[in-house]
Amino acid sequence: MERFNDKIVIEDGLQKKLFLEIKKREKLSQRKLAKLLNVSRSGVKHWASEERKLPQLIFERILIIFPWASKYRNFIRDTLPRNWVQIKGGKIRSKMKNNLTKEDRIKGFRRARLKIKRKVIGPNGELMFNNGEKKIAEELLRNKIKYTYEPVISLGKNYAIPDFAVNNVIIERCGYGNWKPYWSNLKRKIKRLENRKKYKIVILVPSCNFDIAIKRLGNTKNIDILKEENLESLLEFLKTKE
């Protein structure tokens, strides 16, 4: 399939008018015009309806075949690179990201990572993913330890959203079994947090997954892996970091 580079920006309505004029003056259907331009019929359809920007290469072919169309040069307002959609999308996403509140980021990033409905209500009214998270939150409050649920932590161009934060201690509750992509993503998150150095990281796992966590994360520095059934060990850990 032929790839087109730069696109041209013609004044609103005039790209459509160009193709209508070709149809009327040359008595060409979209199918015949596509064959003449050596492109797909769907391409012609999108350009004629202005659903897509017209590639500069195709515009030049049109002018060679139909010299009378050279008048449309006067209506070109800009030229865009081939990846202009990605560039535009990136700018929009960046602008949106910068305008988001922390609450918006929590919802957005969590929804992107895990499309799971939250049905568990935490002790502070948070919507949590499971009873494991709720139990951790309740134990922290019972011991008068204030926590932040799903804080948004800026890591340069990236963000991390751990399950809990208690001062500079990050707590991740990991309920998955031996699912490699999950542990790989978690390992990347941990490494990003480690680069900030000020964070201490605790991984809580069910006893049945403890060996899996050791296998997957055992080579990762500066983390403590604890069994979630023994939350006293977490409380002791937090006391040492006060």
Image (tube, helix red, strand yellow):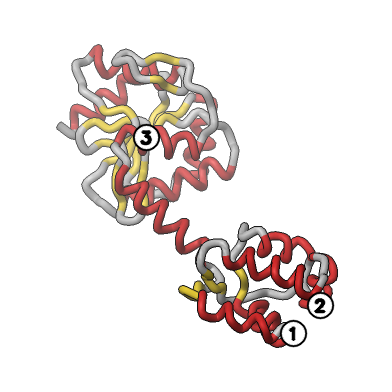
Q: Which corner quadrant of the image does residue 17 belong to?
A: bottom right
Q: Which of 77 and 146 is in front in this view?
A: 77
The one nearer the camera, 73 or 112, is 73
Mark 3 burial class by Cα count in 10 Å: few <14, some 14-19, many 20+: some
Q: Distance between the residues labelled 3 and 2?
A: 52 Å
Q: What residue type is labelled 2?
A: Leu
Mark 1: amino acid: Ile
Q: Position of residue 84 (x, y in %)?
A: 50, 66
Q: Residue 56 carries which label?
A: none
Residue 35 location, quadrant: bottom right
Residue at left 30%, top 55%?
Answer: 156
What residue would you read off at disc 2?
Answer: 36
How far across and down, in percent of the image, does residue 52 sit? Answer: 61, 62
Q: Residue 106 carries which label?
A: 3
The nearer-to-camera label among 3 and 2 is: 2
Question: Which residue does the image show at 66% across and 58% down from the upper left?
Answer: 49
The answer to whether the residue labelled 1 contacts the one labelled 2, judged by CB atoms less than 8 Å apart, is yes
Query: What residue is pinned by disc 1?
Result: 65
For label 2, the SS is: helix
The mark that comes first in sequence, 1 or 2, is 2
Q: Is residue 88 above or below residue 240?
A: below
241 left or right of 128 in image: left
Mark 1 touching mark 3, by CB under 8 A? no
Alpha carbons under labels 1 and 3: distance apart: 55 Å
Q: Tell me residue 12's x, y (percent).
A: 52, 62
Asked whether the viewer can see residue 20, the reply is yes
